[in-house]
Amino acid sequence: MQVALVMGSISDWPHVKATAQLLDQLHVSYSKRVISAHRMPKQLQSFGSKAKSEHYQLIIAAAGGAAHLPGMLAANTPLPVIGVPVQTKALGGMDSLLSMVQMPSGIPVATVAIGNAGAKNAALLAAQIIGLHDSDVEKQLINYRQNQTKEAIKSNENLK
Ligand code: RP5
């Protein structure tokens, strides 16, 4: 598997599905799992410290609220970690975003936007990294961009 897709709770899955679907579309292989930073700290450390030797190339980690999952995975692996801030009911996901984006110097988390745009951009960013040395994934990305441009141009027809 090229990517480990990790979420803090099963309640994040409806949000993370958009990431999984786009990884499928872009031919990026992944495994998916729930690891709660707070409820499963030992499992988090074990997964993070073995991820590279298990041949993952990067980790996508989605969490909401006190969203320590991506930061703590990043602390336990040399692999790049993309953080997806889940939109929360209480604070709209601003809590998730700030928990991820304000990492201390030395342990980066590449944080995408709150909501559906972020969930999709995490998959695209992962594919861009994998596509540097995987020509099939690179080809899928080129197609994706071309279709997106066509759709945007075509949307002019709806301006009535
Ligand atoms: C975080 O707490 C999870 O990522 C989730 O977004 C949030 C709430 O989790 P549940 O109480 O719904 O399991 O760790």
Image (spheres, helix red, strand yellow):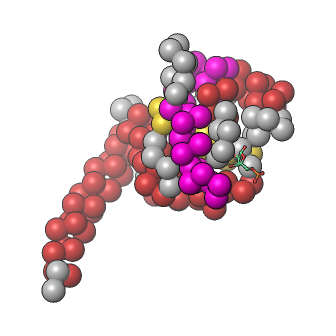
Q: Residue furthest front?
A: 91
Q: Residue at x 60, y 51 (%)?
A: 91
**Quarter assignment of residue 61:** top right
In this view, 94 is above or below 158:
above
Tally of marks? 0
Res. 53 image quadrant: top right
Is residue 89 on the magenta stretch? yes
Viewer-side residue, 24 vs 160 = 160
Q: As drawn, which residue projects farthest toward the bottom?
A: 160
Mark yes or no: residue 123 visible. Answer: no
**Residue 52 percent coordinates (x, y):** 62, 23
Q: Quadrant of the N terminus?
A: top right
Determine whether, in the image, residue 76 is placed left or right of residue 15: right
The answer to whether any part of residue 68 appears in the image is yes
- Image quarter of the C terminus: bottom left
Q: Position of residue 118 (x, y in %)?
A: 46, 49
Q: Name the quadrant containing residue 94.
A: top right
Residue 119 x/y as whole percent: 50, 51
**Along the line of sight, which residue is nearer the eye, 103 or 59?**
103
Against 15, residue 97 (above or below) is above
Q: Residue at x 52, y 27 (%)?
A: 102
* Magenta stretch, residue numbers: 73-101
Query: Which residue is pictured at 72% across the width and 57% down the height?
Result: 11
Q: Residue at x 50, y 55 (%)?
A: 115
Percent x, y for residue 108?
Answer: 51, 23
